[in-house]
Structure formats: structure tokens, C-alpha cells
Image (tube, rainbow, N blue to C red):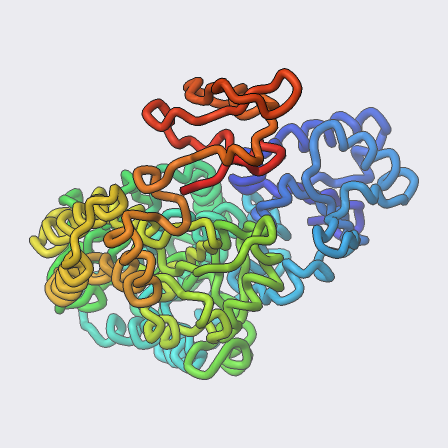
Amino acid sequence: MNPTRLQVLICGGTGCISSGCLDVETAFMESLEKHGLTDEVFVLKVGCLGFCEQGPIVKVYPDNTFYVRVEGKDVEEIVVEHLLKGKTVERLLFKDPETGERYFYYKDMPFYKSQHRVALKLCGIVDPEQISDYIGVDGYQALAQSLFDMTPKEVIDLIKASGLRGRGGAGFSTGSKWEFAYNVKGDKKYVVCNADEGDPGAFMDRSILEGDPHSVIEAMAICAYAIGADEGVVYIRAEYPLAVNRLRVAIEQAREYGLLGKNIFGTDFSFDIHMDLGAGAFVCGEETALLNSVEGLRGEPRIKPPFPAVVGLWQKPTIINNVETLANIPQILLKGADWFQSIGAPGNSGTKVFALAGKINNVGLVEVPMGITFHDIIYKIGGGIRGGKKFKAVQTGGPSGGMIPVKDINIEVTFENLLKAGSMMGSGGMIVMDEDDCMVNIAKFYLDFTVEESCGKCTPCRIGTTRMYEILDRITKGQGKEDDIKELKSLGETIKDTSLCGLGKSAPNPILSTIDWFLDEYEAHIKDKKCPAGACKDLVSYVIVPEKCIGCTICARVCPVNCIHTVDQTVGKNKKLHVIDQAECVKCGACLPKCPTKAIILE
């Protein structure tokens, strides 16, 4: 970035691209040329700014004005009013839905106020396709510091002292993992970046690679120097085309600048990186299955021990860290272990990035200090539950995680606390649920995903999860049996104890945690053949209360299968009572929100 010019920063992450940010960029270029401002205003497409609910986002520097939901048709007004006249376009500022207050500066907004950006520090600040932008904000200084001022062991000791734990889910000490590989003697070692982000609703690693790929490249080089490796692999799913392209550009630029390849910074240290595209198998997020995939084998987990740090890629010592873990490394080198320890909670240093989604007002990517409570994430950052509904549960850890009920909303988010609550940190998915969500149906959804994605290598995961899904499917259809809950718990514990890899061991978590915290919903499905949340179609019926029907015909007009008919009963002048034919009703729910008198109810 050129600090001497006015700058227009346009969020160019996948979410904003899907919302039309490329049209916004084109409109800016055309409008600036029209008004003769191309030499005075610099337009920059940056990475994800996090507030996905409000995209496309445009920031104007140096005054830090933050415009939301910008469309191409809004650009001329921004150019004329803001860039030419110096007036803020207030209608495009973020408006708090509760207070009505509009925010000029993004750091004053509740969504950002409680965040602390470390891994995401440069996302939304630098052009991810310009290495000069990264170098301009101390990029590759940490690598230079490592090579010229520190021994490999000193680098490892610093990472250990920082307390950084793996952000891919397990939470193992990053420095200790590096030390294992360092202590193994060998002429060939590897550094692997795990960018195979397969959890439903998760997009943390993708956003980092889209917005700040050089931080990951630099961190891999630092790791390579520390353990004695000369080759790196980024294993990234092919479904991330934007991240793949920006990472490819970043690797090529790093080579051109001599920051990858032979004799980096004129030293005897050599290191290079190549990408390996995954085909989208969830199990390949497990580190040993990932290694098999890179080697051209089936994506199936290996038996551990030996661990990859000792016997990894091509049977050589290999360090595998996920994207978010690596993104913390350069800043720890530059700012020190004490700085990183000062953020977060005891034993849980630093921050954690979460993809906040579900029944929440402010959907987006958030980075918070470890130890923050769920309440603060959901209500301060997330803006509360959408539509004023009641909070019911939050699910962390993707298909491997469990449900955190409302009674635990004030627990501090740490690795240990989530495990105690029956969930796990996972890679960072956080799905918020409200009173309209059925916990039995949600558990079935996650188990359906696990069954589909099981590699099939071990019997407990391959067969056990299928049997659990069959039981849940019966329950949600009103065919549950009294001993089903006991059977689910028995199967779940067996799968956890006997599965080969961590994915299989954690697959029963959504079911076991919902049984623990929402047993009454299971019993209602099994004993009463009712879904309290009204989410299981086989257990609900849409009916019209005769006393409330005014014969307006709105429900009949929105019904896609024409199952709402009139009967010979007058409810008003020339108007007839309506009824729903249960035999024809497909239970789509289209009629429910349209009824002006709330005559349609669920039974």
C-alpha cells in the first residue's frame, strides 16, 4: 500500500466475491477515471475483513470509513460525496439493528470491538497478490531474524515458550511437535501445511490463505529452518480455487524475491514449497490420511505411533501444522513469547479464529482471545440470536464436536473447558442454534456427514456410525423404540474407544452430547412421537385453527402443492374457512409465516 494516497480497500474474499465485490471494483475504476482521480486514489482488493453478513465491504483510508453492503450502483455516490467532497455516505455505514446507531469507524463496532487479530492481522490490510505489501509490514523479517540471529533450537524454544498450541483441533504444543522432528536424525525432512478444511461451515484457513498467504509461507520456512527440512507441501482442497490461486501467486513471488529456493538470504539454508490439491475427502484433514493422499495412496489414517514427526511423508520426519497455527508464527518471532502469552488464558495462549454461523445476527469470521466466554461471542460480537429467538445451543468442532447448551453459555472457551462440556475446539467452526432447532435432527445431520465421509478402514467407524444413523433416522420419523437411547450411547462409547483415528473417535460427540443435554427431546420423539421444535417433518402437522381463519386465501396462494382448500363454512362476508389436507401436505412450511392472523399452527 502507498500511504501517501487515498486508498479504497475492497474486501475480495470468497464471500464478498459471491456478493458482487468484483462489480464494485469495476465501478470504482470507471468512476475514478471519469472524475480524473486515478492518480490520486489507489484501489486495492484485499482479503476477508470478517464481517461476511455485511459484504461487500469497502474501507476508505486514511480516515478508516467502513462501508457495508456496497453495490456497484453505490460507487458513484462514494466517489463524488466522500472522495471528492469529503462527506461520509451515512446510509452505507453499518447500522446496529438494536440501537439504530451508525458506526463510522469499524473498530467501534460491536462485531470488532471484542476481537483481537493475530492470525488475521493482515487480512483486509494487504493485497494478497503483492509480495511488496507483505514486505512493507515487516513481512519475512521473522525469517531473517531466525536465520541470522537464532539457532534452530532457539527458534523451537521460543515457540515452546509462547505456549502456541495447534489450532487444527488437537491443541498439542506446536514447539514440542517441532522439537520431536528436530531431535530425529535424518538427511530429509518435510514441512506440511494442512489446508484441507472440511468442517461444514468452516472457512478460517481458506480466508487466511486468500488474504495473507505470505504469512503461511514465511512460517513454513521458519519451521523448516528449525527442524532441518528443505521441502514443504501445502495440502489444500481443490474446492478453494481463490485460495489456491493466491497461494500459487505468493509462492512464485517468494521464489522471485529469493525467499524460497536455494540459499535464502544468501545463507546455506534452502527451502521450497509446492502445492498438492485434495479432492475434498473430510478424512484427509486427519494428518496421516493427508500424508497417504500426498503419496498417491487412499486417504486412510495410519496407525500411530509412530507419529509423523518421526515417520511421516515418504517415511521421513514431517511436521504438519494447519494454516491458522502457522499464521501465528511470524508474529511470535517478532514480538516474543511473553507478548503471545499475555493474550488469552493460562495454558491457552493467544487467540482462536472461529467461523461464526447459524442463527446469529452477525455471521462472519472472528478472532478472539482464548478464554472469552460463549456469551460474549454470541451476544457482543455476534449481535445475539436472529429474529429475537431464544438461544438453545452452540456447536463447536464441526462434525467431531458436541453441543454446548444454554446453561454453559458463560464458560470460558479453552481446549480443556470444551472437552469437559462434551465438545472440542476443532478447527474453529461455531454454529449457533435457537429454539426452532431440533437437537435430534441436528445430531442426525452431522452423523449423516460422518457416515458419508468415513474412509471405511476400521469397522467401528464404518459400521458403527451407520448403525447410529439408522437409529436416529427412525427416531426422527416417529419409529423410535424405548431402548434406542441406550443403544445409541453404547454404540457411541464403543466407536470412541475403538476407532483407528481421531475423526472416528470423535464422530459420536454430537449424538452423545445432545443425549446428555437434550434427553427430553429424544424422549418426546420416541414416546410421544412429537418433535418439540417442529423440525422433523414426519412428526408435525400444519393445521388451521377455525376460530382464527378469516378466509383471506393467502395460505392457499403460497401453497406449492395446492393442499389448502375451502370448506362449506362461512368465516366472513363471502369468505370460507380453509383447511389443510394432511394427505396432500408436504410440510414445506410456506404457509406458516404468511398467515396474517397466525391461524396456522404446528401440531
Compared with residue 448, is residue 427 higher up or lower down, i.e. above or below?
A: below
Kindly indicate the quadrant of the structure image that contains residue 377.
bottom right
The answer to whether 222 appears left or right of 61 in the picture is left
Q: Which of 228 and 370 lies nearest the eye of the viewer? A: 370
**Residue under the point 65% across and 28% down:** 23
The answer to whether 271 appears left or right of 484 in the picture is right
Identity of the residue furthest to the top in this view: 574
The answer to whether 366 appears left or right of 520 in the picture is right
Q: Which of 420 and 195 lies nearest the eye of the viewer? A: 420
Identity of the residue furthest to the left in this view: 459
**Residue under the point 74% across and 31% down:** 28
Residue 570 appears in the figure: yes
Compared with residue 583, is residue 377 higher up or lower down, i.e. above or below?
A: below
At which x and y percent is residue 58?
A: 70, 43
Q: Which of 149 and 14 lies nearest the eye of the viewer? A: 14
Q: How many tags in the picture?
A: 0
At which x and y percent is residue 213?
A: 48, 51
Where the C terminus falls, by quadrant? Answer: top left
Kindly indicate the quadrant of the structure image that contains residue 156.
bottom left
